[in-house]
Amino acid sequence: SSAPEIVPVPRHVPVGDTFNRANTANGLGSTNVGVSARAWQVFSGTWGISGKQAYMSAPGGAPALAVFDVGEKAYSITWTIGVEVAGWNGYVIRHGDSGYYFFSMNGANLTLYRTPTTVVHNFGAVSLDPGDLLRADVDGLSVEVFLNDVSLGVTAMTMYDTYQNVGFR
């Protein structure tokens, strides 16, 4: 199964992960940047680390999902792109008990969705190439999205403003 290989590195929050640890096919372990390690929570799928990048080797259910708690309600998170994602694979913000938001490619367009498949905002045609930096500055019910430090726009979310988990699916 083809899966996104991404390296999330949050900014302006006390926790992050560079996946700078031994290769494993048995989970993601704990974050390695910041004042305290945070355990990755796997909700679905088989996740691992290879070459300092996270990967999903088997969906195990729809959708595969792994997140960690950043410890803040307002945060900025940057994902370093390993391979372009398509379909329902993507980058998760504001994950909690009731649902979450995620960015994914919809054809050539970067789109923010609210689970399960509600389109929140289409940020337009972009290309996510290996090494690109996708960043989300999240505060309350607002998110500003950047690609390589260029703003793609700001949009409003309608719920989950207290959820602090981020990750990928």
Image (spheres, rainbow, N blue to C red):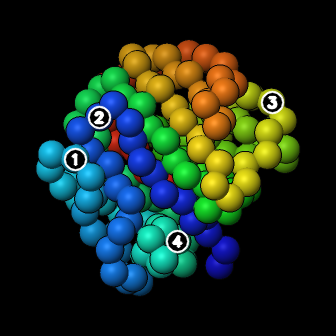
- Judging by the rendered image, the residue that carries numbered circle 2 is 13
Task: Give the mark nearer the N terminus: 1 vs 4.
Answer: 1
Give how far apart the Cα atoms at labels 4 and 2 are. Answer: 25 Å
The answer to whether marks 1 and 4 mark residues whose Cβ atoms lie closer than 8 Å is no
Q: Is residue 33 above or below residue 4?
A: above
Task: Give the mark nearer the N terminus: 3 vs 2.
Answer: 2
Q: Secondary structure at mark 3?
A: strand
The picture places residue 20, in percent across and down from the top left corner, at: 36, 68
Q: Quadrant of the N terminus?
A: bottom right
Task: Give the mark nearer the N terminus: 1 vs 3.
Answer: 1
User: What kind of residue is marked 2?
Assistant: Val
Q: Secondary structure at mark 2?
A: loop
Q: Which mark is residue 44?
A: none
Q: Is residue 149 above or below residue 31?
A: above
Q: Is residue 105 above or below residue 86?
A: above
- Classify 10 Å Cα crowding around label 2: few (below 14), some (14-19), many (20 and above): some
- Judging by the rendered image, the residue that carries numbered circle 1 is 34
- Judging by the rendered image, the residue that carries numbered circle 3 is 124
